[in-house]
Image (spheres, grey):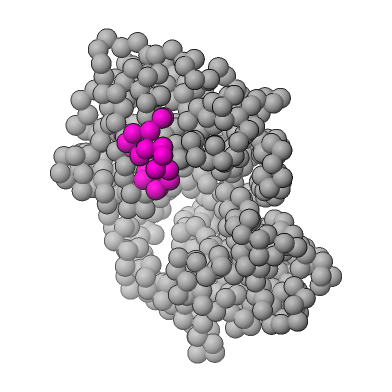
Amino acid sequence: MLRNTRRRAVGLVLAAVLLFVAPGAFAAGTIETAATEAPRQVSVGIFDRGLVPSEEGSYESNRWVDWINEQTGVEVTWVPVPRWTAFDAYNVMFASGSAPDLIMEYVRPRFETWRDQGVIQPIDEYIERYSVDYKAYLERHPDILPWTTFDDGQQYFVTSRRFSTANHAAWIRQDWLDNLGLAMPTTTDELLEVARAFTNNDPNRSGRNDTIGITSRVGLFEQMFFVSERFYVEDGRLVPAVLTDRYKSLLDYRKTMFDEGLIDREYVTDTDQQRARRLWKTGQAGIYFAQTLPTFYEELMANDPGAVVVPLEIVEGPYGQNGWLKEPEYNDHKVAFNARMQDPQAAIILIDFLIGGGFAPTRFGFEGVHHEVVDGVRVITDNEKFRREVFYASIDMAFVKDYEITADYIIAAAGDDPVARAKAGMEAAAVERSMSVDYRRDYPFLPTNETLSLFFAEFDPRLSEIITQAITGGAAMSPERATGLIRDEWNRRGGGEVEQIMNDWFDANRALLGF
């Protein structure tokens, strides 16, 4: 029987509607400035997502930079780092000696790489000596330590629990189901039949052949067949997903979808998913796999005002029912201390300020300015003002925070705006549906290992080629032949050594991983 891991039932909500948190006295100017013996300085790498409106300034200088400096008594310098090339950018800065004091990233193995290079340092001593609020946070959440502690027994970054773990959903056109007299699909077989009907039976009643069953190439099928993670625990050992029988079943299912034209046949070249998104928001696709937030809702309604979109049921496949992808609970912002940092106490002052409540204004804005508190819920009073003055800061400036949300509060936080309430209702339904079924992940993160990194850097491109050939190659490439080629490629490149490395790591960390 497949093993489902347990995850906390909290849902994904984007900052534009994420306004629930136990409100405190975070109006402008109400937080006391941290007492310090002398002026302190710290620099922080922050993801540059290109979101700061010109009238607000820049990532280096804006209203929230000024506010944090005033509240903490620390001169905090924010150093923009390109979001999607942050790892490379940091490596260049480390090499030139220009890296900021605090290094912000998401991917845990990258911090292990930096630890091994000696460019970041342990932080346990600083937490013990200087911290009050973050230290207390760790005491309340001791299960955070496996994430922050490396194999030498020391912590190398600060982090906090995600306010959500559910961040993916599949969306389906309920109006198309109704037009064709179809029930919501609950199994992979039923999903296949619905995709056929959406493609072939004129679900939008246009009288033309202008619809497709499913768009998006992101993970939907892999999750249904329990092969979306690299390894799974089978009979007490880690086994590569691509070597399981489930993987052959996945390829067979995807190939059927492609051969019958139920998915977009141009998906191979749609690497940035622009075409998939266009098919969805122009009302040409019946099912779209994205995030719990109803993606491109306004565009879809503008193009197809009669569209009714609801979350797809989490379908059951031949190997059971696997939930849509959920993030590990502590897979959020991670911030390390540069080995060359001059004033670690300044860094701790900033971290304590944020985790102790300072995160709230940068996430939600100020009461009476950007929101009102109604029955304990922060409700946006002016969506445009919030989007202009708060949203750009809400994503990354509060890199540690202490709150969570529920589906009920997503709706409450939307206020009276009809579009916001419609989206919030859809999102709440998606969160509830996502959290109703566990997503199988047998370990929270992969170990950092040079052999593993080199192996997958070479293996993954060839795997992608074989998968594409299997799905698009017609009778010339069966799933059986494809899985044979995958196994041959795995063995030829040294997959046996990779399996041994993974299982040695697994055996050494069974208690940590819950086995």
Above or below residue 164? Residue 379 is: above
Point 39% across, 43% down: residue: 54
- Image coordinates of residue 244 in percent, x first then y, are 52, 67
Q: Give the range drawn in magenta.
A: 44-64
- On the image, the x and y values in percent for residue 198 come to 72, 74
Q: In the visual, does 127 lie left or right of 18?
A: left
**For the point 25% across and 12% down, which residue is it?**
38
61 magenta-colored: yes
Residue 510 visible? The answer is: no
- Asked where in the image residue 376 lies, by quadrant, the reply is top right
Residue 455 vs 404, above or below: the answer is below
Of 298 and 285, the residue lying toward us:
298
The vertical placement of 427 against 400, above or below, is below
Spot the residue most to the bottom. 476
Q: Where is residue 37 in the image (x, y as percent from the top left)?
A: 27, 9
Question: Which one is in front, 466 or 390?
Answer: 390
